[in-house]
Image (cartoon, rainbow, N blue to C red):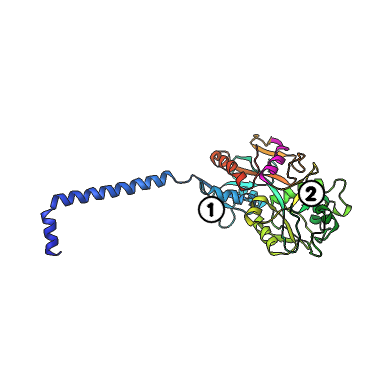
């Protein structure tokens, strides 16, 4: 140490030491206080979930309030993982919740015997999103009657120049653009909602014989071989974007995220309805709330295959939230319901 430095400390031994200790104490106090603040502001950890891709946008937004992981591996795979407690690769253990657009039967058991709850979380609209390349869309938007979208999804209407589509829109929207239908290749609740709807409306008067739905209802469907399969709602949206003439079914929140247009669909009341939180909510209100299961801890909403209200979006359903009954998810569920409409979802009871 230099002589001048030694003189500085020799002349000020007590005052400098006291000041140094004070500064150190203040600094330490600030660090402790900051650490306490960070701890107090830490998001509640609700564990790990799997399931429907329809709520990916919602769960991503909720990560600002809650700490959790979520693997959107589809409703079917998600429920299987939840009940067997075998999370997919990359998902931490243990699984604490799942999401599905297809309600459980009520007889499923969790490995280990743990009790669970099922509640309707949000309303979802399954849109028919499309690629505009080569199409002349009317200012009011693309309209599809039941005969048209039954024909498209059954594989009998193969070109955008089809007379049924032209009649819906008042003029021909394309000279010769082949239709490429994109469907979910994985076990999907979106497929369940869509096929439930088609199994009802594509058998009604006014639907040509070639367009009558005979592919059943389920999370997986045997689609025409010429259709394009994709995994997850995001995968369907990407395939629509990259294929001229493409149309496919994807939930409204994912469609909005991917910035895809959606067709206005003719509903049971005879109105062409655009998908929106309000039109999805109107459809959900037409449903019937049912409580079931051994301990009456499971809730679903029935009678949504063809909602009757004038403002109802016709292909609407519910995403269900499943969790273990000994865990507290009240705050998470409340936040999800509050946030849902701003992201393109409908409200449920």
The residue under label 2 is 198
* Residue span colored magenta: 276-290
The vertical placement of 101 against 7, above or below, is above
Q: Which quadrant would the C terminus be assigned to in this image?
A: top right
Mark 1 neighbour class, 10 Å CA radius: few under 14, some 14 to 19, many 20 or more: some
Determine which quarter of the picture holds residue 162.
bottom right
**Residue at the (75%, 64%) spot, across then down:** 134
Tell which of 263 and 64 is nearer to you: 263
Q: Is residue 276 left or right of residue 167?
A: left
| Residue 222, horizontal then vertical, whole percent | 78, 56
Q: Magenta span has 334? A: no
Q: Magenta span has 284? A: yes
Determine which quarter of the picture holds residue 115.
top right
Who comes first in sequence, dot 1 or dot 2?
1
The residue under label 1 is 92
Tell which of 323 and 136 is nearer to you: 136
Tell which of 327 and 269 is nearer to you: 269
Examine the rendering and report whether any part of residue 147 can be seen. Answer: yes
| Residue 170, horizontal then vertical, whole percent | 82, 54
Q: Are marks 1 and 2 in contact (CB under 8 Å)?
A: no
Disc 1/disc 2 C-alpha distance (Å) = 37 Å
Callout 1: helix, strand or loop?
Answer: loop
């Amino acid at each position: 140490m230099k002589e001048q430095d030694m003189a500085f400390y020799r002349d000020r031994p007590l005052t400098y030491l006291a000041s140094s200790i004070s500064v150190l104490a203040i600094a330490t106090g600030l660090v402790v206080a900051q650490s306490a603040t960070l701890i107090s502001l830490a998001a509640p950890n609700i564990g790990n979930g799997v399931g429907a891709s329809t709520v990916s946008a919602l769960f991503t937004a909720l990560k600002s309030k809650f700490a959790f992981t979520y693997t959107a591996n589809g409703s079917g795979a998600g429920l299987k993982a939840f009940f067997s407690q075998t999370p997919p690769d990359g998902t931490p253990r243990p699984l604490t919740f799942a999401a599905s657009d297809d309600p459980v039967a009520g007889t499923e058991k969790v490995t280990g015997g743990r009790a669970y709850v099922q509640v309707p979380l949000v309303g979802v609209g399954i849109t028919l999103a499309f690629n505009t390349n080569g199409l002349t869309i009317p200012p009011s938007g693309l309209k599809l009657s039941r005969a048209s979208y039954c024909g498209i999804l059954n594989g009998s209407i193969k070109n955008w120049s089809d007379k049924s589509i032209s009649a819906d829109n008042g003029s021909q929207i394309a000279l010769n653009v082949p239709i490429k239908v994109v469907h979910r290749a994985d076990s999907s609740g979106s497929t369940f909602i869509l096929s439930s709807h088609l199994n009802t409306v594509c058998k009604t008067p006014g639907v040509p014989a070639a367009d009558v739905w005979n592919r059943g209802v389920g999370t997986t469907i045997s689609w025409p071989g010429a259709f394009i399969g994709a995994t997850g709602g995001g995968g369907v949206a990407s395939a629509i974007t990259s294929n001229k003439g493409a149309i496919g079914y994807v939930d409204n929140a994912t469609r909005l995220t991917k910035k895809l247009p959606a067709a206005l669909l003719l509903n049971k009341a005879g109105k062409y309805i655009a998908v929106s939180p309000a039109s999805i909510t109107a459809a959900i209100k037409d449903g019937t709330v049912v409580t079931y299961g051994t301990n009456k801890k499971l809730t679903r909403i029935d009678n949504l295959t063809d909602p009757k209200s004038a403002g109802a979006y016709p292909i609407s359903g519910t995403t269900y939230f499943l969790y273990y009954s000994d865990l507290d998810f009240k705050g998470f569920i409340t936040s999800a319901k509050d946030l849902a409409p701003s992201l393109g979802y409908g409200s449920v009871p």
